[in-house]
Image (tube, rainbow, N blue to C red):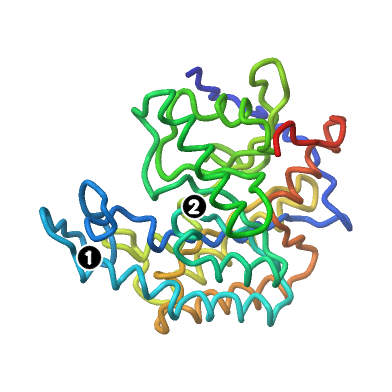
Amino acid sequence: MTRDFLGYGGRPPHPHWPDDARLAVSIVVNVEEGAELSVGLGDERNEAVYEIVEEVTGAPDAAKDTHFDYGTRAGYWRVVELLDRYGMAAHMNCCARALTLSPWLARDAVARGHEIGCHSYRWERHAGMLQDAERALIARAVSEIREAAGARPVGWHTRSAPSPNTRRLLVEEGGFLYDSDHYGDDLPMVTEVGGAPHIVLPYAFDTNDMRFQRGGGFHFAEDFARYCCDAIDWLWEEGRTAPKMMSIGLHLRIIGRPGRIAGFQHVLGHIARKGGIWVARRDEIAHHWRARVGLPPWQATSG
């Protein structure tokens, strides 16, 4: 894989966001509960990274299981009720198995106006996957999300590292408008895959509640809020002449805890008070970027 160290070379294109917004903000809610590796669900091992770092081997791990369960049982409702309060739509970055186990969540999120994207089948990296196995996994993930949500996902994001084949396989599958397997910029980009243009939207691990995990640097709700608001303010100022895009990453089992959710509330209030910010679903941003660079309207080539 060839790395591009120059990018837009200090001269980023003007995105012309709707209503001349200075900043586009994508709120990404990761839905992974039930898709983490779990011996109790028949997987080869247990996930070792959650509120603590410990791997139980050779037996089900009820501590890990119920920690993840908190995300759907309690955290989800706090997150979506805040989004409703501020009238903001999010991208639900869903592992397919999570929605198969909680199809009610897919239906509820769609009814509230959120986008359902694909975060693979299980919550696992794709690096090292064999091509045929990865192709089959992508197809299974699409099928199960379609079954749960009533529509197929058009966006993809891999946990951790994709394989060298992931993006090509997504394009060959024919139903993905964009992927988010990129952390190297503050604006979308177009890349050529198999002779066709493909949209890539950047994601971020810094403006992300994952930093509440051990060693991540966030301890209090204020830490998350202050960091995200500082990023918003800086990009908003840059947006006077060069508007950008920003992703805010959330996890139901992390930000949904009562000691952390106030940080998310503070960020949403800051966005609402500041103005000049387009809070958009990722499919909306991808469609906008295609139009901005002069590409024809996108149509899936698979169901």
- Label 1 sits on a secondary structure element that is loop
Foreground residue, 294 or 112? Answer: 112
Question: Residue at horizontal 43%, vertical 59%?
Answer: 32
Q: Quadrant of residue 69?
A: bottom left
Question: Residue at horizontal 70%, vertical 15%?
Answer: 195
Q: Quadrant of residue 50?
A: bottom left
Q: Which-is-in-front pick, marks 1 and 2?
A: 2
Count of marks, rendered view: 2
Judging by the rendered image, the residue that carries numbered circle 2 is 96
Q: Residues within 10 Å of mark 1 (few under 14, many from 20)?
A: few
- On the image, the x and y values in percent for residue 3 come to 50, 22
Q: Amino acid at mark 1?
A: Ile
- On the image, the x and y values in percent for residue 33 come to 40, 63
Q: Residues within 10 Å of mark 2 (few under 14, many from 20)?
A: many
Q: Compared with residue 261, is residue 54 higher up or lower down, i.e. above or below? A: above
Judging by the rendered image, the residue that carries numbered circle 1 is 52
